[in-house]
Amino acid sequence: MSKVLIVEDEVKIAQLLADYLLQSNLTSVMVHDGNSVIELVRDQAFDLILLDLMLPGKDGITLCREIRQFSAVPIIMLTAKVDEIDRLIGLELGADDYICKPFSPREVVARVKAVLRRTQSQPVNQTGAILNHVAGHISGSVAMGSTDTLSAIELDPDKYQAHIFGSPVELTAIEFNLLQILAHNPGQIFSRLQLIDKVYQDHRVVSERTIDSHVKKLRKKLNEIKPDMDLVQSVYSVGYKLVL
């Protein structure tokens, strides 16, 4: 039975969600402020987190950022803020989905099941980190034009961490998936729509600007490691490719 962590300061809403989840054979643990969340996530194995944006103590954005430093457990943001910027901030930090308040508890359960179906089709480690679609590490075999370049890119799916020519770089879940797609197919140009389809397999509505934003952040992190190389290149009016 899957276990969901509900982080919601409104007790009645949290209890209502817990009741609906239980009806769908999903157990839950409720927390009503943000201060104890990190310790709880480190100590217990959760299959998914329902995370309210506005919380006493640490807010949802801060918690999402801190959780992504050590775990890739699926996170669905609950928010009364419907502004596009707030949505993008949450997703760029590694949230898997968001639901706007007021919401139907049935909708929340449906979204939870959809994310669990997608993530539980892959192995999960003890910290709840979802292993990536490609098993093992992607290593120097992706190097182009240089057969003696070893371990050019290594992807650690347990930590959602990449090593670029031996140097570690911390990535969000979406940035990690983007890099994996590009690195597994070096030189191939992916359109924005193709990347959306591959990264967001639950078919949520995502704009091309969102992908541009994720790629921009990914490129910045890679350039900090290898400033002399533009590893992820944009192809005007087409999309993106990885070149080594």
Image (cartoon, rainbow, N blue to C red):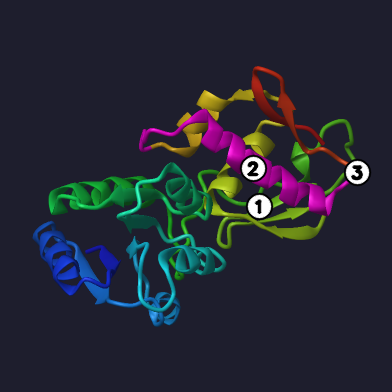
Per the rendered image, the range of residues in magenta is 202-228
Please identify the dominant SS of the magenta region: helix
CB atoms of marks 3 and 1 within 8 Å: no
Residue 68, given in percent of the width and then of the height, sits at: 52, 63
Please tell me whether mark 1 sits on a helix, a strand or a loop.
Answer: strand
Label ID, residue 155: 1
CB atoms of marks 2 and 1 within 8 Å: yes
- Image point (26%, 63%), residue name: 2
> Is tag 3's residue or tag 1's residue first in the polypeptide sequence?
1
Please tell me whether mark 2 sits on a helix, a strand or a loop.
Answer: helix
Label ID, residue 179: 2
Residue 11 against residue 200 in the figure, above or below: below
Residue 169, given in percent of the width and then of the height, sits at: 71, 58
Question: Going by the image, does 144 lie left or right of 221?
Answer: right
Label 3: which residue? 228
Question: Going by the image, does 32 lie left or right of 203?
Answer: left
Count of numbered marks = 3
**Marks 2/1: CA–CA distance:** 9 Å
> Is tag 2's residue or tag 3's residue first in the polypeptide sequence?
2
Residue 40 against residue 15 in the figure, above or below: below
Q: Residue furthest top?
A: 237
Camera-near label (2 vs 3) is: 3
